[in-house]
Image: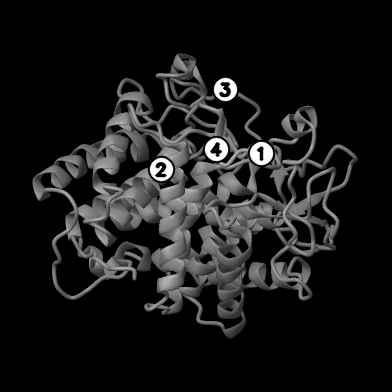
Amino acid sequence: MRDLARRLPIRAALFAVAVIWACAGPQSERMRIADEMQPFLQDQMLRKWYPLVVDSVHEGYLSDFNYRWEPDGPQNKMIVTQARHVWTASRAAEFTEAEATYLPVADHGAQYLRTVMWDQQDGGFYNLVTREGTVIAGDEGEIIKRGYGNAFAIYGLAAYYRVSGNEQALQLAKEAFRWLDDHSHDPEYGGYFQFMARDGTPFTSGYQGTPPKDQNSSIHLLEAFTELYQVWKDDILRERLQEMLFLIRDTMVHPRGYLQLFFRRDLTPVSYRDSSAAVREEHYHLDHVSFGHDVETAYLMLEATHVLGLENDTTTLRIAKKMVDHSLRTGWHTDVGGFYDMGYYLPGEDTLTIIEDTKNWWAQAEGLNSLLLLADLFPDDSMRYFDKFRTQWKYVDRNLLDHEHGGWYAGGTGKQPEMQHADKSHIWKGAYHTSRSLVNCIQRIRENVEKPVELE
């Protein structure tokens, strides 16, 4: 394998030091897990996705495949999925010896973002198009653009530029950032509006019942700005990256240690806790505890602090740890591992109630990544992160990895055996969460570069 320290991005060396430190867990056990992860990642994930999803007829990537990896569906193309494939193929070109296989896949997608998904008239990226490239309007016939989708376009293009050196890709990433910042950024209260009209006019009160700001868009804007700042040291970009880090950390994270999901323009959180049970249940999609997002955000915040050079930022480290600890204490299946999908603090109760005990694929992937990160940062902590990481990998291996057909099931088969025949790919399910998690875990284990820390 090539010199990873030279080729891989900053995320591969969070808090890296010049000497090898003892990491959590026996080295033999760590290496065993990496030796299980790597062949599955390369043979049963990356080689299953690429070049299978490449649309050689209409450009971009195909979206819909059944559990046998057969094309099956409308093949509409969403900016989120298209950009995530660009990012994943770029990372695969860095991580594996098969750059000649994966870089052309990333080339293909980056070109599609520029020629089809980018609005040549008004700027910004379209949210959804048909397989042939016709823009799909909303229910009321209007073309809606989203901060969430534009964030992933920036994310994918920045990663692709880092690997390829393609200046067109970097210029488009810069243009996309400036367009988003000009139209979506809120100079009064901070953060970004999620929904915009085609010309970029933001919906400052939200759209079709969804509030104007949310944690999911915010954490992925943080992620995108982190990626872009590694290749473009722009002052405004740095300012926005730091703004999003502190906004998420200090405002969106509840004092208990979980992300509040949706917000009004002034960043007041949307909550239905004091409503009737019927109203509360009707709005669970806007107001609940999402353990997957919490463990993912812990990692994204720590990544951002490193890229910003905030090496002594113990506040972010403390809150990131608190978020993972909260998820383990309230949303972790202690018997077999895995993070549940949804929890809720019901009125009058201090303990959290699990309201959805299924375990989706992406949350389990993010759990692997963050548990190993904290295991190496806090090897002697009473939370025993490495033991949880080992349990999580065993759960994933038995309940989410399709060892027959390849790829990940959409949900844990212990609770949902029907997931064995669910689609392997659609516009909301690609290879991004899963490949990022396994690449990060394999690198962390192979390189042993994490320095234990202590919090007072």
- The residue identified by callout 4 is 352
Where's residue 78, x and y in %? 64, 43
Task: Estimate how packed mark 3 is, as few (under 14), some (14 to 19) or many (20 or more) residues with alpha carbons within 10 Å.
Answer: some
Can you tell which of label 1 and label 4 is closer to the viewer? 1
Residue 393: image quadrant is: top left
Kindly report the distance in space between the C-alpha atoms of the residues bearing marks 4 and 3.
40 Å
Quadrant that contains the C terminus: bottom left
Q: In the figure, is residue 399 to the left or right of 2?
A: right
Q: Are marks 2 and 3 in contact (CB under 8 Å)?
A: no
Image-quadrant location for residue 41? top left
Which quadrant of the view contains residue 21?
bottom left
Q: Nearer the viewer, mark 1 or mark 2?
A: 1
- Circle 2 residue: 328
In three-dimensional space, the C-alpha distance between marks 4 and 2, rounded to whole angstroms, equals 12 Å
Res 425 visible: yes
Give whichever of 163, 411 is nearer the camera.
Answer: 411
Query: x%, y% of residue 118?
Result: 69, 58
User: Residues under labels 1 and 3: Cα distance?
Assistant: 47 Å
Q: Amino acid at mark 1?
A: Gly
Q: Which residue is mark 1?
A: 348
Is 439 drawn above or below residue 74 in the view shown?
Answer: below
Q: Which of pointers 4 and 3 lies earlier in the amino acid sequence?
A: 3
